[in-house]
Image (tube, rainbow, N blue to C red):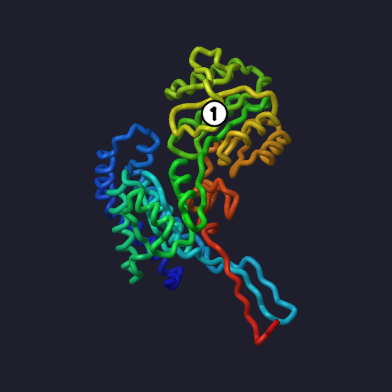
Amino acid sequence: MEAVLNIEQRNAVLLKMAELIAKNRETLIAANQKDLNSYSGEDKAMYDRLKVDKAKVQGMIDALEQLANLEDPLGVERFQFTHENGMHVFNKTAPFGTVLIIYESRPDVTVEAAGIAFKSGNKILLKGGKESLNSNLEIVKLWHKALASVEATTDWVTYLNYDREKTQKFLEHPTQRVDLIVPRGGEKLIAFVKQHATCPVIVSGRGNNFVYVHNEADNALALDNIINGKTDKISACNAVDKVLIDKNLPNKEDFVRNLITALKDYDVEIIGDSSLAKYEEVKTIENDKIWFEEFLDFKIVIGETTNNKEAIDKINEYSGGHSAAIITRNQQIADQFMMSVDCAAVYHNASTRFTDGFQLGLGGELAISTDKLHQRGPIGLQHLVTNKWYIHGEGQIR
């Protein structure tokens, strides 16, 4: 394995990359426009993720600059002791080696996720979707220029322009070393990678996030929370798809009507269980399988529940293990909910839209893991490392 670039080199590459993106923002947007013009699908979330505008370009620049200012995640001492025979034993963080990121639609992954993996001392293999090829290739050109600025080889960031068949063959029989795979996309992509991969995979799984409105909720807060979670960004994995309303909520009739009105203002399709389908604007659930679905669309399911335990049980049965929120003034009930719900991020009186590496203080994210090994939730710099033991002796033998 090629020696890891030192922290000064890695930071210099990140800052140079930010500079190059700023200089080439119009070129990137033009390349992206080719991808948008070629996109023939009707998936709103896919289109939203694919689009690169001035705000997204600025987000890429900001992410790189923030990354360059973060502490080096490598060589951090996790544990140390002196053996009874005099050996000095240390455990320190170390890079994985080579990280393969397979993703759909999002050109910003080519900057932000790759940047995190690079800062963590890893070589990067990028396999983007065909729908964002022009955007991705333009960004990779800039990566190579940034690497050249510190006289580093361009194979620190490699783009794999493979079709599905060639990708499958690579996953099953890699033609170069791969230590970790991170799929970023829908359930079909994740299932495809898990089926064929021959090395560890971090699963950035489905959202399908729930909000439970407890009977001691602040109704106005609950309304704002749900509308933000559902409509702020429908393509986000931290968006809200399901709402459970306590049947004993005071002024429940007014709350439900206000919720329906607010959702309809955003053209959200509302589907409800038998207790809520009496409202004209609410369609009746036809199949309980809908409780499992992640929508990534202007669509929501609302249902009634009898208590905290029932809400917890329903969320644990149907959610994607991503994020869940409770709205209540009762701290004890909130604590019980947060301890018992089996999700990577749990919220009390706050929006699930905060499940994001930047928002949770990580300076960005590679992915949001719904697995429990080796890291759960947003994966930042400090998580994209493994560890290594360093033992210093003076001739000790066992």
Q: Residue at x 42, y 72 (%)?
A: 2
Residue 279, placed above or below residue 318: above
Q: Residue at x 40, y 64 (%)?
A: 176
Q: Residue at x 40, y 50 (%)?
A: 109
Residue 16, placed above or below residue 31: below
x and y, in percent, of residue 172 in the image: 43, 56
x and y, in percent, of residue 120 in the image: 48, 62
- In the rendered view of the protein, which quadrant contains the N terminus? bottom left
User: Does residue 61 appear in the picture of this structure?
Assistant: no
Dividing the picture into quadrants, the one containing residue 88 is: bottom right
x and y, in percent, of residue 365 in the image: 48, 51
Residue 380 or 310: which is nearer the viewer? 310
Report whether 266 appears left or right of 334: left
> Could you classify mark 1 by the number of other residues whose Cα lies within 10 Å: few (under 14), some (14-19), or many (20 or more)?
few
Residue 359 or 286: which is nearer the viewer? 286
Three-letter code for the amino acid on which mark 1 is drawn: Lys
Q: Which residue position holds label 1?
A: 289
Q: Please give the count of numbered marks on the rendered protein.
A: 1
- In the rendered view of the protein, which quadrant contains the C terminus? bottom right
x and y, in percent, of residue 245 in the image: 62, 24
Residue 178, placed above or below residue 151: above
Farthest-out residue, bottom: 395
Report whether 328 appears left or right of 76: right
User: Does residue 162 appear in the picture of this structure?
Assistant: yes
Query: What element does badge 1 sit on?
Result: helix
Residue 246, placed above or below residue 196: above
Q: Residue at x 65, y 75 (%)?
A: 89
